Amino acid sequence: MPDVNLTIDGHKIAVPAGTLIVEAAKTVGIEIPVFCYHHKLDPVGACRLCLVDFTPGPPRPQTACTTPVSEGMVVRTQSAMAVAARADILEFELANHPLDCPVCDKGGECPLQDFTFRHGYPTSRIDGPRLHFKKPIPLSDKIALDRERCVLCYRCTRYYDEVAWEQELTTDERGVKSFITSQFDQPLQSIFSGNIIDLCPVGALTSRVWRFESRPWDMTHTETVCSRCSVGCSVTQWERRGQLVRVTSHENDDIDEGWICDRGRFDYTDVNDPSRLRMPSIRGKRSTWADAIGAVAAGIKGKGAKLGVSLPQDLTNEEAFLFRRLLDGPLKGAKVKMHGRTAIPAPEGDTMRIKEIDDASVIVVVASDLENDVPIIDLRVKKAVSKRGAKLIVVHPDGVDFDRNPHTVHIRNAKGAAAAEVRKLASHESLQNPGGPVAILFGDGHGSEDMNELATACGDLAEKVGGKEMPLYRATNERGALAAGVAGWDKLDGVEALFSWGPPPTAGIPSSAKFVAAWDHLPRDGYQEAVVLPAATFAERQGSYTNVEGTVQFLRPPIALRPPLKEGWEVLCELGAALGVSLDYAGIVPIQREMSLQAPDPSPEPMPVLIGPAHP
Amino acid sequence: MAELRGSYGDQPNHILTRWFGTPDLHKLDVYSGKPGGYTALRKALLDMAPADITNEVKTSGLRGRGGAGFATGIKWGFINRDAPGPKYVVVNADESEPGTAKDRYILENSPHMVVEGILIAAYAVGANQAWVYIRGEYDEPYRMLTEAIEEARAKGYVGPQPMGKDFALDIRLYRGHGAYICGEETALLESLEGKRAQPRSRPPFPAVKGAWGRPTLLNNVETLATVPWIINNGGATYAKLGTAKSPGTRLLTVSGNVRKPGVYEVENGKTFRHVIMELAGGPPEGRKLKVFWPGGSSAPVLPESMLDVTTDAEALAAARSMAGSGGVIVMDDTHCVVRAAHRLLKFYAYESCGKCTPCRIGGDWAVRTYERILANEGSQVELDTLQRVSDGLQNGRCLCGLGDSAGWVIDSTLRHFREEYEDHALRHECNVGAVTANA
Amino acid sequence: MSALSAHVLEEIKELPSKYPQPRSAVMPALDLAQEELGHLTPEAMSEVAVALELDPGYVEGVATFYSLFHLEPVGKHRFYVCTNLSCMLRGANEIVDRLKQSIGVTQPNQVSPDLLFSYEEVECLGACEFAPMMRLDHKYHYDLTPETINDVVAQLRKTGLLPTRGEVAPPHSSGGGPQGRRGSAGGEIQAPKKPRATRKKKADG
Ligand SMILES: Cc1cc2nc3c(=O)[nH]c(=O)nc-3n(C[C@H](O)[C@H](O)[C@H](O)COP(=O)(O)O)c2cc1C
Ligand code: SF4
Ligand code: SF4
Ligand code: SF4
Ligand code: FES
Ligand code: FES
């Protein structure tokens, strides 16, 4: 788009046509305060905090968040008119605000505090009694709402409606009595609910998982990658005194656009579980690492197909690389089952990128309930549909959340017959002349579909209509494990020895297993008789994941590993040694270097490539 | 037949109310039997090009009667008649501005005049579908309009080929459910779409993106009811009435402390003295007029000394008020301005949609301040607060006009009646004879 | 047991197709529900939501915005007395006082002991030339005096079940009155509503 020239507070700038004044100002470091405006939501001009004045324009302050720049425009954020307008708005905002900052979770990172300091009147002119609402009420077991602090910017409800396509969060009443509420005071159920905490510009919406535990300034925070599924959203993990106390979103436009799902946000308390395993043990008795590793090696070595291995969904590429060496050697022939993996075969080449969904004119979703399988991709698809009018075709036996849009074409296939429906799609009217790229996202129907057939059908469709495919792997590092050749999908019944890495197999520890080695971070039933190795969690672990689209991302552990806990790679090296394989690495970086050297070139499958330091 | 209180009968300055009072005027055959009844629609559909109709309305100089006074013909011209896809005409029959009853007066007396105006407008802008958004409390007008549309449908005026013209026209009604803000055009559209009625930020304007995201022409009932006369008699004829910038006649609802309250059709440019003292008979025996709202409660007040201001938009603007909805509320010297302002602020606070900060908070803040003053707990602080809140509500601070209106009530009453405020706030007394109980 | 009868739910399901977009059906649907039940319970709102394939929260947000939806029980007959400026200047407050006395209540939205009446004070009803005035059920009453209030109430008491509802109201009309829960000054929220709604998670079928 052509650039538009304008002046903001004396700075001459050129920005793309269509840019809003509020965004243009940022490019020269000018802060226009905002409450209701959020760059991922449609502007509504509700809070009126962003008032500025500009010529040509009416002789009144105007909202910078709804006005696009125009050629030759002169914007003044510091004219007397604009300054007074914003100060007045802040004063109105504070007229009923409880000012309980000392006990507010938002204290220290609160725009209302900051803006009042920078744009408000220096002294309070507020008199008289304030309006009262009942103090924090639960919106769910994860989120609390304090209506007195709410500035009614409607970010939370707009997000719910626009982005998540749900209305279980709503505004009741009108005028000064308006308040945010969950529908009929029922707990929020959306898997996307937690984003409203990040969106809320004041301390009205807070995490109940984190509430009052600490203030922002006594935490350290680290930008890393979520470990809960294959999407690999960027997150910020907050640490305080060795504990993981909060997870928030961290915008990465290529993947998550600043949203995370509730699994990624709230599913972290196991890291701080006081019952965490910290010492190795053999049949309930504490042992040294050396003894325990020796016992594991003795129990699993040379068992061939009588050994079962259960892999966690979030093993790192580095761990997978090392484990592959064991599988090729002393553990050859073992049955391997990876948690949460799909029946989708390894990709044959590049697959579609998440970001490319943004360009699609037609999106076809087959055999997957995105909302639960790959949550944040679900939001990307919704955006394409509601903001750009992309057409959506779903092939799935059951109802899905996309049905909320009346224009969604939902073809309900019989279980196992998705491929047949996909073959018919080539002649579907929306695909006859799609008018742009077609995105084909396919899952495995949680095992109900014949994946060879379905993958072929999707491939054929892509070829016919000019589409790109995205196989929807679900397990966190399924793609990396597939590339490393360790992502097994075997049945573990009947094995005599079990190496249970991560949580126990979904079907439970097979009763046939006479020897069990468990490498886990929490104690579980059935570990009394096992050799147990304590494991690091995602918050302490080093390494990388390959996400659903094939991007390799490095973890930056927010919590330092406390001995005697060891890094996964370290344990695998020691186990290798005990099994007679030389895995002699001084750290994770040499492993990564070797992996990148081994990557076939040109790589049909992105092998983990070092893209900068793994650790800050 | 509805009781008539106001103008009716064939008088030289009666354009809208000329046949009011005719028994059964709400019936199609009676209306058609009167000179001009449905002849404008026939003329528009069969003898005029759509652009000519719009031009005729432009020539007339007709200005919107809903409150904002925007030039009607120009507004029609904003709709791209050739844009593909549906277009709508939406009729604002939400009449809720305090002191305004004219749309009800029209709908109860001559619904066919409105139907005819709607059909002409729809044809002119290329809309096949019109929606009338009518306030929920208007049971009788709703019934009469529904019946009128059914009659017109039976006659073929509403339908696939009105008067044989190959241009389908349909009118449907949508009932409001109690919210003043639905009179604001974009809030009305939100409501019509089944949402909470919170105004939209403009642009885009309804002419580009209106009902259900489609180009939409929005007009008030009285505006459209005037159109048949303009088509029948020519825009130029209409433009000769009234003043140069505010041509024609309009319906003024005169209410409050007058002897003959009613809806009067008045040629623009007459003085309020004529309207209030002559047409409406002035205040009751023994009382003096103190203040009046010239254009609904949202129009800044004018004191008795300004009775000679004329009813046209320009004169009112010069007097720092506005023509608004034509609701003339008259208050005599037995009533207290502070209490009246308090009552209106309660209205604006109650009706605030809550979308934008100044109006949501400010209206309520003002009400609580008035309450302290009226409870004799006031001081200079309260007076300053009122002024501050009033300033914070006006001049672009709010998203829609409701906030400004609330500010104007405070501002104009303070401006003209500072002493009454000071009596209350500083001296804790009310110097008005008969104080209305718990106003 | 559903709150709304099967035929009303059927009727509601027909509504969305009558509008360019289905959400417009929310208010007409709530009218039907209110017509049947007198006021809108959380159950009824949730059923309307399910019938229209919306989240109950959406319906709740709409229903609580508009004053003509009643969220709490109302009397069989409902008085909406205009107390806005033009009516106030002509004695609306005395009308309200007399009405309270006549129907035996002390405040707006309170239902009279015989369950026949409730009232509220409303904003301008667009009939200021007849001030003071009120809407009683679906009919306007003009030029009120304390005496006419007495007469009207007495008349309703005598006929008891006088069917003013539906007398002039066409089908799909609005039912009754606002809750007056949104007085301008208060900010306190009401006691939590009973958790009721069933979230329609998957639109199956
Ligand atoms: C708060 C507010 C309330 C309004 N109420 C009404 C109303 O009840 N009826 C009406 O016709 N216009 C009302 N308007 C004006 C409308 O927004 C709009 O300008 C008008 O309907 C356009 O029609 P017109 O050009 O024919 O006047 C209101 C405006 C505001 C800001
Ligand atoms: S709860 Fe927070 S995000 Fe939601 S409206 Fe209030 S201030 Fe805005
Ligand atoms: S979508 Fe997956 S990666 Fe993203 S936050 Fe949720 S669980 Fe984590
Ligand atoms: S001015 Fe008042 S009514 Fe208008 S949008 Fe703002 S809050 Fe709503
Ligand atoms: S940020 Fe612009 S109006 Fe809220
Ligand atoms: S003020 Fe009562 S009807 Fe208008």
Image: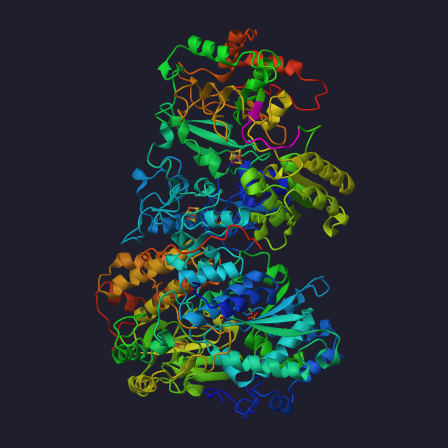
Q: Residue at x 39, y 45 (%)?
A: A140
Q: Is residue B290 left or right of residue B272?
A: left
Q: Magenta-highlighted stretch: main secondary structure? A: loop
User: Residue A335's image quarter?
Assistant: top right
Rendering coords of residue A147 (x, y %): 36, 49
User: Residue A21's image quarter?
Assistant: top right
Q: Residue at x 57, y 68 (%)?
A: B70
Rendering coords of residue A47 (x, y %): 45, 51
Rendering coords of residue B304 (x, y %): 37, 77
* Any part of residue A42 in sight: no
Rendering coords of residue C27 (x, y %): 50, 66
Judge by depth and name the residue closer to the eye, A602 or A443: A443
Magenta span of residues: A336-345
* Any part of residue A561 in sight: yes
The C terminus of chain B lies in quadrant: bottom left
Judge by depth and name the residue closer to the eye, B330 or A501: A501
Q: Is residue B238 left or right of residue B406?
A: right
Query: Which colour assignment does the render follow?
Result: rainbow
- Compared with A89, B135 (above or below) is below
Judge by depth and name the residue closer to the eye, A558 or B261: A558
Judge by depth and name the residue closer to the eye, A123 or A436: A436
